[in-house]
Image (cartoon, rainbow, N blue to C red):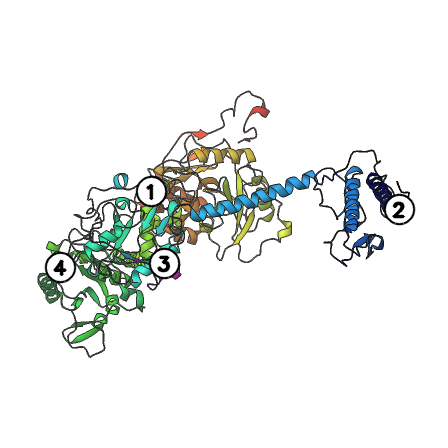
């Protein structure tokens, strides 16, 4: 064999040795330049393959970027933070040897990174376990959200709007059109046997912490028949105002699933504007109709010629009807609601005050001839005091006849003329309900209702005997004599009440709608129902909203404890002592000081005793004893402790025990100083007695608990001139309160604890009214005066008092609830 030639096997071995040599050179260069701390694997080790998803390497301060191999492509390496051409790795050619060399370098670096627990950005980073879990969880949440969104979009669900009655949908334009097929279902006619317990689903209302029903209004739609003819005319302004009032109230909800009551947006106020059959079919199309259960319809003009039924003729099944012309034959007691017929005239006209000129007035047009002949006969008999008006026939063009009334050739402005009469006739017309009733009430004229079987508006809650006179139709001829028998004082009260009814319940569609919902609400939540006084007493009578202690409350009071009212004039030192002692009572809720001295300002705030409860000073405008019984807004509790500024001897235990006794008897006067009234046979008069006896008929309000309801009665409902007499004589306000409470309840007072001495030892003779020599004489006169005003002697005599159970027992003081009751 020639020396210059090598065998193929030898050439292959030489190439392998050369390749291994080059590889070792590259490894040495790599270690010197970028990884001097690493020791390369031995040649005898197993071939290393990079496993990028394993291990936890530390991040090295360099990176090698491998770019696509092409001719002339530069290769870069990152040394520290500098980037420079890697000349020793430059890929100047695309020879297969170079590619193999670069591949080996890459494989070596990747293997070294895995083996020596290092890694660089050139490799795919291996995520830490906690980061991997975080990203997997985040990706899962996003994926689930996308899946849920897709399912909601395509899964069958309700398409009923949650905000149907919005401002945008109140317009009649661009509302959805619903076509009613001719063969659509028609509801049954109204069931006259329906009552709240038979046709109303109270379980839809459920428990509500605010005790208010929720009302849902269906979205506004345009209903047409098969020929695209509208079922009803455009929604009226009155009905739009009614729906707006409901949607703006606390009753409204836009969630149909929470609703207790449903109000359709189909206007049925005026039956003359309806197609009866098609309207009934439209009602049956409502999504929650269910035979009309819990649905409320408003109608003011029912019936039509020739019969003029007194209830809406549209078949409505079980739906409630708020109607404006009910008779006793069509009204479902306790289910339907009788509402007034709204009068746009009374709502738009401001009536100035005018003097009375007529005793009786009739202003209705188109009356039945028999009724008009009876009225004209009354006018002929009573001449100037009766005025019968009719429609004007000689008005100039452009003058609306609805604003004018005529008597012969004399023209009167309407409804202004109603103010000139004491009584105004309200006769039935073609329909029982008449808009003139609203006009009459606004004018303050007492309505004389002559319409047999007519259910007056809101008669379920309003006491119409206080504002109107109802006369049978057969007694029209006797009407004048009946009205003349009413006392003048009662007439004035009825005029005021009539005006109040209009302002509260007739003035607007809003007032009518809300009153209707309140009545239905009271049926569903009777334990929180509005009281008779709240429905019928004007706001000026502030005590109307205060609960009467004669009736047990169905729900607990909002505020516990009692309010102490201290009446003072000038005794600052004893006042501060009283405040300090009273503030120790655990049940005290608030302190109210009535400063009755107009010539002297109260002490500065910094000198008042520091107490744990709110303390308020009220300065009065006049020095009156009745100021202590005024119903101040600051009194939030039901219990009131009236105490004088010189009652410094009562302990906190005595006061707390007195409050506990009052809680058992909230309709009684519960107090400490006991007094007695006696009959003097020599003078045949009542006598005031302050000596210690075995009997008690009064407790003085210088230290007594009572219900705040009696403050309202004392201020606004005290019989006769008793209140003025007390203020004029500066005496006997406590006796007057005893008379008032005993007359209302028919019960005696309750004296608590054995204490009998209540004189202030530090007070001088000029400090107190009770030390005046004429004081006792006047108090006997008070009893006789009050007995004559009340017409009876309401005070009750008792021979007992209330003491703690363990008061006299030989028992450790620490174990007694009220150890410090005190001495006589």
In terms of secondary structure, what is the magenta stretch mainly?
loop
- Nearest to N terminus: mark 1 or mark 3: 3
Q: Which residue is mark 4?
A: 305
Where is the N terminus found, in terms of image quarters? top right
- Nearest to N terminus: mark 4 or mark 3: 3
Depth check: 558 or 734 in front?
Answer: 558
Q: CA distance from mark 1 to mark 3?
A: 23 Å
Name the mark on residue 55: none
Q: Which residue is mark 2?
A: 32
What are the residue bounds of the magenta stretch? 161-177
- Element under disc 2: helix
Depth check: 724 or 383 in front?
Answer: 383
Depth check: 547 or 406 in front?
Answer: 406
Q: Which residue is mark 1?
A: 524
Q: Are marks 4 and 1 in contact (CB under 8 Å)?
A: no
| Image quadrant assignment for residue 420 | bottom left
Q: Is residue 673 left or right of residue 98?
A: left
Q: Nearer the viewer, mark 4 or mark 1?
A: 4
């Amino acid at each position: 064999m020639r020396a210059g030639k090598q065998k193929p096997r030898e050439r292959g071995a030489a190439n392998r040795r050369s390749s291994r040599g080059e590889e070792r050179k590259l490894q040495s260069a790599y270690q010197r330049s970028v990884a001097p701390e690493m020791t390369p694997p031995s040649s005898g080790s197993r071939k290393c393959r990079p496993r990028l998803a394993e291990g936890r390497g530390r991040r090295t301060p360099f990176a090698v970027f491998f770019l696509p191999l092409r001719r002339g492509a530069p290769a870069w390496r990152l040394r520290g933070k500098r980037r420079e051409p890697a000349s020793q790795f430059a890929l100047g050619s695309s020879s297969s040897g170079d590619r193999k060399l670069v591949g080996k370098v890459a494989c070596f670096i990747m293997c070294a990174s895995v083996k020596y627990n290092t890694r660089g950005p050139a490799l795919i980073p291996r995520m830490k376990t906690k980061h991997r879990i975080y990203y997997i969880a985040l990706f899962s949440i996003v994926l689930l959200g996308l899946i849920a969104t897709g399912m909601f979009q395509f899964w069958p669900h309700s398409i009923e709007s949650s905000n149907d009655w919005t401002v945008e949908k109140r317009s009649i334009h661009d509302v959805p059109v619903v076509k009613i097929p001719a063969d659509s279902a028609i509801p049954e006619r109204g069931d006259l046997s329906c009552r709240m317990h038979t046709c109303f689903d109270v379980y839809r209302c459920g428990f509500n912490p605010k005790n208010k029903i929720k009302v849902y209004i269906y979205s506004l739609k345009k209903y047409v028949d098969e020929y695209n003819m509208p079922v009803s005319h455009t929604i009226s302004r009155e009905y739009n105002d009614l729906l707006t009032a409901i949607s703006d109230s606390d009753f409204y909800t836009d969630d149909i699933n929470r609703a207790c009551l449903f109000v359709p947006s189909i206007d049925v106020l005026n039956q003359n504007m309806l197609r009866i059959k098609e309207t009934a079919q439209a009602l049956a199309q409502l999504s929650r109709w269910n035979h009309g259960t819990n649905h409320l319809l408003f109608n003011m003009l029912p019936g039509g010629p020739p019969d003029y039924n007194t209830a809406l003729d549209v078949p409505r099944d079980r739906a409630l009807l708020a109607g404006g012309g009910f008779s006793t034959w069509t009204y479902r007691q306790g289910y339907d609601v009788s509402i007034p017929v709204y009068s746009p005239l009374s709502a738009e006209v401001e009536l100035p005050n005018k003097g009375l000129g007529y005793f009786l007035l009739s202003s209705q047009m188109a009356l039945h001839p028999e009724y008009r002949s009876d009225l004209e006969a009354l006018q002929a008999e009573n001449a100037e005091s009766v005025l019968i008006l009719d429609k004007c026939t000689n008005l100039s063009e452009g003058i609306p006849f609805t604003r004018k009334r005529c008597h012969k050739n004399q023209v009167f402005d309407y409804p202004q003329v109603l103010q000139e009469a004491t009584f105004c006739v309200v006769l039935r017309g073609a329909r029982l309900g008449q808009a003139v009733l609203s006009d009459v009430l606004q004018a303050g004229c007492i309505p004389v209702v002559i319409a047999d079987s007519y259910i007056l508006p809101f008669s379920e809650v309003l006491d119409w005997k206080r504002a109107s006179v109802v006369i049978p139709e057969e007694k029209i001829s006797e009407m004048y004599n009946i009205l003349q028998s009413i006392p003048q004082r009662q007439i004035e009260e009825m005029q005021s009440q009539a005006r109040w009814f209009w302002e509260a319940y007739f003035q607007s569609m809003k007032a009518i709608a809300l009153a209707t919902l309140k009545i239905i609400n009271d049926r569903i939540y009777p334990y929180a129902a509005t009281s008779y006084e709240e429905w019928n007493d004007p706001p000026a009578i502030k005590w109307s909203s205060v609960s009467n202690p004669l009736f047990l409350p169905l729900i607990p009071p909002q505020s516990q404890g009692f309010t102490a009212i201290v009446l003072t004039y000038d005794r600052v030192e004893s006042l501060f002592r009283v405040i300090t002692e009273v503030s120790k009572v655990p049940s005290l809720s608030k302190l109210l000081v009535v400063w009755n001295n107009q010539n002297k300002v109260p002490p500065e705030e910094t000198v008042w005793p520091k107490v744990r409860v709110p303390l308020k000073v009220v300065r009065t405008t006049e020095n009156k004893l009745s100021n202590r019984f005024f119903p101040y807004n600051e009194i939030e509790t039901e219990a009131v402790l009236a105490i004088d500024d010189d009652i410094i001897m009562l302990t906190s235990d005595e006061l707390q025990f007195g409050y506990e006794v009052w809680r058992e008897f909230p309709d009684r006067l519960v107090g400490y100083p006991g007094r007695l009234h006696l009959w003097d046979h020599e003078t045949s008069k009542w006598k005031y007695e302050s000596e210690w006896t075995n009997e008690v008929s009064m407790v003085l309000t210088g230290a007594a608990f009572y219900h705040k309801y009696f403050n309202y009665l004392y201020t606004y409902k005290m019989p006769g001139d008793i209140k003025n007499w007390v203020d004029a004589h500066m005496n006997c306000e406590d006796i007057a309160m005893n008379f008032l409470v005993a007359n209302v309840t028919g019960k005696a007072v309750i004296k608590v604890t054995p204490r009998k001495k209540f004189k202030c030892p530090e007070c001088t003779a000029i400090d107190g009214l009770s030390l005046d020599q004429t004081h006792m004489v006047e108090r006997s006169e008070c009893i006789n005066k009050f007995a004559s005003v009340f017409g009876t002697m309401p005070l009750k005599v008792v021979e007992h008092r209330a003491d703690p159970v363990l008061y006299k027992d030989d028992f450790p003081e620490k174990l007694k609830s009220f150890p410090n009751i005190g001495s006589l």
